[in-house]
Amino acid sequence: MTEKSIIVDLPDSVELVDGPSGLSLLRLSTPVATGELYLQGAHISAWAPAGEAEVIWMSKASMLAPAQPLRGGVPICFPWFGPGRDSSMSPVHGYARLADWPLASAEDVDGTVTLVLRLTDADVAGLPGAEKWQHPFELTYRVSFGLELAVALTVRNTGTEEFVFEEALHTYIAIGDIHRVRIEGLGGSQYLDRAPDAPTERVTQIGSVTFTGETDRLYYSASPASVIDIAGGRRITVASDGSANTVVWNPWITKAAAMADYGAEEWREMVCLEAANALESAVTLNPGAEHTMSAQYAVDHSI
Ligand code: BG6
């Protein structure tokens, strides 16, 4: 646990615990919601409104080690998405998810807990990939665990030259059975299919998204989208602002089997629905300027 991570007072509903491998974990429980967030990556690993089953999926086989990506939760992808705009960047999804994010504040207002974490270029020095994107920046991540989960990522250019970045809130949603899931809200929008051997031209989505194999799509849509989880008997809606893209991902059988941090059959229990600004939608920030991408997650039973 790093000293700089724990300088703020925590409300009684929030505790800071030593998670696996000494990773610092904030755990909260109120009459309104429960949740968890690892300071590494400012990584939400749990959230549920009171009375609901867990909404955020975490792999039981996730690596939980310093500077290693966690599998599941809400990884923050920054300053590039996937392998980046020219497909050459590593580590995949940038280095923000590997960094230890200092906690700036924590408060509980009527059972909704809001955490603010802040990361600067000084905090990422030495991390894998940090030398590939070296601009001065400040990220502010505001997370409210309540009846809804509300997150907002603000990127500020603290340097003297413009920079370009990609970003995503790579949210893993817990579902009952991927074979009995559809995603509503993306019909009519175009997408780039990033699955192996897929055509390189954009495709138009007809109706709801359903899953019959590896699915890795970048939609050119920021409309609200809902995961309809028939087996789980619920709808999880994601509404975002400040994003141009929605990513939908499930690795399916072969890709999941090739990843050490997926347990057997775990691919059936998750789907990623991600607010993003990637590829052509990368954001350009002038010196002193800032950009916020936010997302709100809500659960209901109207399926
Ligand atoms: C998705 C990408 O967002 O994240 C996929 O579209 C990628 O291509 C997936 O495989 C998982 O990435 P990672 O680095 O967490 O295994």
Image (tube, rainbow, N blue to C red):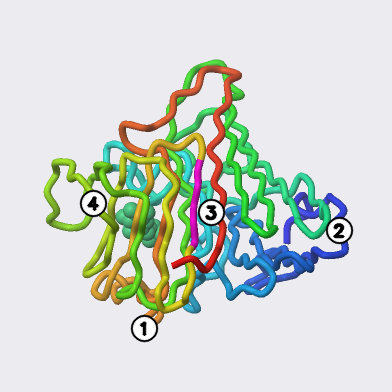
Q: Secondary structure at mark 2?
A: loop
The question of residue 237 being in magenta is answered with yes
Which of label 2 and label 1 is nearer to you? 2
Q: Is residue 298 left or right of residue 5?
A: left
- Going by the numbered disc 1, the residue's amino acid type is Ala
Rounded to the nearest whole Å, what is the CA distance between mark 1 and mark 4? 24 Å
Rounded to the nearest whole Å, what is the CA distance between mark 2 and mark 3? 26 Å
Task: Tell me, for residue 300, which label it has, or none.
Answer: none
Rounded to the nearest whole Å, what is the CA distance between mark 4 and mark 2? 43 Å
Q: Secondary structure at mark 3?
A: helix
Q: Is residue 207 left or right of residue 283?
A: left
Q: Secondary structure at mark 1?
A: loop
Q: Answer with mark 2 or mark 1, whichever residue precedes in sequence.
A: 2
Q: Answer with mark 4 or mark 2, whichever residue precedes in sequence.
A: 2
Q: How crowded is the residue under tag 3: few (<14 C-alpha within 10 Å), some, or many (20+)? A: many
Task: Tell me, for residue 264, which label it has, or none.
Answer: 1
Residue at 47 percent of width and 77 percent of height = 61
Q: Answer with mark 3 or mark 1, whichever residue precedes in sequence.
A: 3
Residue at 33 percent of width and 74 percent of height = 180
Mark 4 within 8 Å of ligand 1, using the beta carbon: yes
**Residue 296 spot, x, y in % from top left:** 57, 49
Relative to the observer, which residue lies in front, 205 or 72?
A: 205
Q: How crowded is the residue under tag 2: few (<14 C-alpha within 10 Å), some, or many (20+)? A: few
Q: Answer with mark 4 or mark 3, whichever residue precedes in sequence.
A: 3
Q: Is residue 184 left or right of residue 100?
A: left
Give the residue at mark 3.
Answer: 98
Give the residue at mark 2.
Answer: 11
Q: Answer with mark 1 or mark 4, whichever residue precedes in sequence.
A: 4
